[in-house]
Image (cartoon, rainbow, N blue to C red):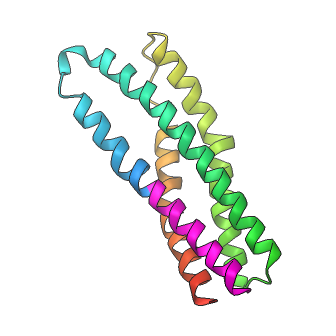
Amino acid sequence: MNHNLAALTAAAAFTWLGMVAGISLLETPLRFRALRADIEREAEVTRLGLGIGRRVFRALNTAEAVLAAVIVAAVLAASPTVPVAVLTGGVVVLLIVQLAAVRPFLQQRGSRVLAGEDPPRSRAHHAYVGLEVLKVPALIALGATALAAL
C-alpha cells in the first residue's frame, strides 16, 4: 500500500474513532445524566436531550460519511493489503447499517417524543450502540493495520 495513502487511511480511521468515542461513548451518556438532575421535569428534559442529540448525531454521521469516503478513496487508489480492504469494508458496512437501517427508527421514535407522545422503548437504541461498540475495535484495527503498511 502506498505510504501516503496508508497514512491518510490511518489518520482518517483514528479521527473517526476519536469522534465516535468522544460523542457516542462519552458525551451522549453524560448529557442525559446531567440533564436528569431535574427529575421533576422528566419529559421536558428528555425532549431537550433528544433535540440536542439529533443535531449532534446528524453532525457526527455526516463527518463519519466523509471520513468513510476518504478511507474508501484512499484504499481504492492504493494496492491495499487484504486486512486493510476487509476492515475498510467492515467499518463502511457498520456505518451503512446504522444510517440506513437503524437511524430511521430512531428518527421516527424521536419525532414522536418531540411531538409530546410517550412511545414504547425501542430496541433501535441498543442496535445503534451495539454497532458503535463494534465500530470502535474495527476502526482501531483499520488504523493500526494501515499504519503497519507504512
Q: Position of residue 150 (x, y in %)?
A: 62, 89
Please identify the quadrant where the N terminus is shown.
bottom right
Q: Residue at x 31, y 37 (%)?
A: 31
Q: Residue at x 51, y 39 (%)?
A: 57
Q: Horizontally, is 93 left or right of 38 in the view? A: right
Q: Position of residue 112 (x, y in %)?
A: 52, 16
Seen from the viewer's position, the closer of residues 47 and 125 is 47
For residue 41, above or below residue 37: above
Pick out the residue farthest to the top: 116
Say which quarter of the image contains residue 8: bottom right
For residue 79, above or below residue 29: below
Q: Residue at x 56, y 37 (%)?
A: 58
Pick out the residue farthest to the front: 4
Q: Horizontally, is 38 left or right of 42 in the view? A: left
Q: Position of residue 141 (x, y in %)?
A: 54, 76
Report if residue 133 is visible in the image. Answer: yes
Seen from the viewer's position, the closer of residues 118 and 66 is 66
Q: Is residue 130 located in the magenta-colored stretch of the structure?
A: no
Q: Which residues are magenta?
A: 1-20
For residue 5, above or below residue 92: below
Q: Horizontally, is 54 left or right of 97 in the view? A: left
Tally the numbered discs.
0
For residue 125, above or below residue 115: below
Q: Residue at x 56, y 71 (%)?
A: 11
> Which secondary structure class fits the magenta region best?
helix
Seen from the viewer's position, the closer of residues 51 and 109 is 51
Say which quarter of the image contains residue 91: bottom right
Q: Position of residue 4 (x, y in %)?
A: 68, 81
Report if residue 123 is visible in the image. Answer: no
